[in-house]
Image: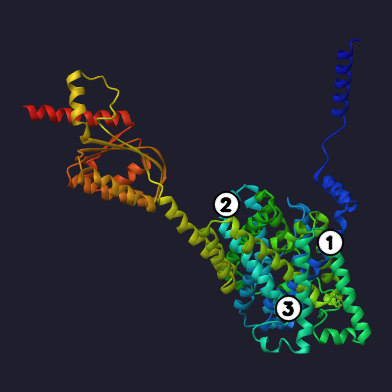
Amino acid sequence: MPSWAYRNLRGTAARLRASQVGPTRSPTMNLISELRADLRSTKLLSALSVGLVVGIIGSAYLISVGALVFSGPLAPFLSQGTIMVVFGGFVVCLVIALTSGYRGALSMVTVPSAMVLVAIGATISTQESALEHFMTTAMVVIAGTVATGICFLLVGHFRLAKLIQFIPYSVAGGFIAGTGVMLCTAALSLMGATLETLPMLLEPASLWRWAPGVVYGLGLFLVTKRWKSHFILPASLLLVAGLYHLVFAVIGLSGDEARAAGLLFAGTATGGLWPPFELRDLAHVDWAEVAAQVPNVLTLIVVTLIAVAMHLSGLELATNVELDWNREFRAAGGASAIAGLGAGSVGSLLFTFSILSHRFGAETRLTGVITAMVVGSVVLLGDSILNLVPLSLVAGSLLFLGLDLLDEWIVKSRKRSPSAEYAILLLIAATIVSFGFLEGVGVGMAVTMVFFAVRLSRVGLIEAGFTGREQHSKRSRPIPDRAILRTEGERIQGFRLRGYMFFGSVGPLIDRLKQSWTSGQRADYILLDFGGVSGFDFSAISGLCRFAHAARSAGVQVVFCALAEELMNGLERNLPASVYDDLRFEPNADRALEHCEDHVLAARRADRH
């Protein structure tokens, strides 16, 4: 047998064996294989360190959110309400870690969503018992969480994420920079360093609360800028935690004394509190009040949608990873829906935590799973399991993350961003710090839109201009007529338009068209070719109506060609019949030019007679 035939036979046999292997493995089996491979990889240590840090920080953050939502009249049910928020964080973190397209995804309730939850807790009013007040609030939180999850699932299923995906660079950058400032502020506040305590910061008792955390955060920032090893974070965590407890042992400071001095994390609950209520407690829900909270639920959906978009955009910018937004919305939607059905609160991917996975080589689903396990342990055992964690370790990690974001988006982006874009970025960051995330994003989008409109208005709508002397129709004409058109062709002025007609570009266009009869050689016919116009807003209709009035008053006929039917109907609806009837509409530029030439020739013949 020839060698080539033997090779072909072997190839055919290999393909037959491959076809008999069986169906493609399920996504679940692929996920299990991926987790097994990561367990044996060098990413495991980074995943453990990042997962533990974010789990501790996230647990403290979720407990704080729960304390804000279930405060005031709801204070008797603080523990049950807090566990709803913590349970939601656990479910969201676990589900998104396993389903997100970004392997290092870390998730919690976003700050804007948390603020809406706080508003829900503050606006619910019942005249009955405290239990009814709690159950009504809990039911609104659950309904809002499930509704948000369903909406996100629909966005992902129908691939609607593209409608909100394109966020301007300056807005996303400003959001990240503002987040960096907020993280630094939160870290200092956690260590007791605020404007109110500024006069007392150098006192020994205060100094020991904030100085170690600042030194740790700043030192970690400087070390990671100099060396890029993934072992820096876990080594620093073990070193600092060990030093703290060694010093406590040397000076004879007990754990309770250290917690009283604000040096160790102080838990509030020693046992599991989930589920937060029993099924029979549903009889105490004020369903009329739940229905009255529909506007707040809609607000929660919209605010969380915006927050998810900003966090996804920020993660893409910070990691240079292109995400499938529809997949991310499905992941966030499924996570929130499951959390809500389990009496938890809403949540989504947080780039502020996820960036740590990228920063320390922990881009594995194990990072999110470990984070979820830490948060889940709080659900099962209470937050007292965090009692051994030095507070400065948590605050210093937050400070490091904030400094890292500020270095990237305030310092380094100055060199790579145009001045105007950088100014918008700083404005957004300042607005976020002064007023909040939603206000900052809103101001940023508004300023960016105005900036875009100004820039776009500088791009003229006129692609080319011509006269009847320079361009003729395809109609065959006798020599005398062609001679007339060469001498009288200036009476026809044509303009080939392009682009999108909007409020910023229509004004300059109309001013330019009016010059056709107010300066130089007067035009009796103005031809407007709309073949290159991609779209328009109502300002275009309004501007063209004003131009039609002015042209009629000047005795000039306007000839439109290749005009969109919608724009033609808009002119008919907004112009008096006498003005509209004077306009001429042709299907293409050649027919429009022929019409103008016929009228020029007819006028010349009339003058001869």
Q: How is the image coloured?
A: rainbow
Mark 1 to mark 2: distance in Å? 32 Å
Hey, what amino acid is under mark 1? Ile
Q: Nearer the viewer, residue 454 or 88?
A: 454
Mark 3 to mark 2: distance in Å? 35 Å
The residue that appears at 66% across and 67% down in the rendered structure is: 180
State whether residue 172 appears in this view.
Answer: no
Q: Earlier in the sequence, mark 1 or mark 3?
A: 3
Q: Are marks 3 and 2 in contact (CB under 8 Å)?
A: no
Q: Is residue 471 above or below residue 376?
A: above
Q: Nearer the viewer, residue 116 or 132?
A: 116
Q: Nearer the viewer, residue 418 or 173?
A: 418
Hey, what amino acid is under mark 2? Phe
Name the element at disc 2. Answer: loop
| Position in image of residue 307 (x %, y %) | 62, 62
| Position in image of residue 226 (x %, y %) | 77, 61
Q: Is residue 304 left or right of residue 371?
A: left
Q: Residues within 10 Å of mark 1 (few under 14, many from 20)?
A: many
Where residue 462 sits, quadrant-wise, is: top left
Q: Earlier in the sequence, mark 1 or mark 2?
A: 2
Specify the label residue 166 is tagged with: 2
Specify the label residue 190 is tagged with: 3
Q: Is residue 62 left or right of residue 504?
A: right
Q: Quadrant of the C terminus?
A: top left
Mark 1 to mark 3: distance in Å? 24 Å
Q: Which residue is mark 1?
A: 370
Q: Is residue 533 left or right of residue 252?
A: left
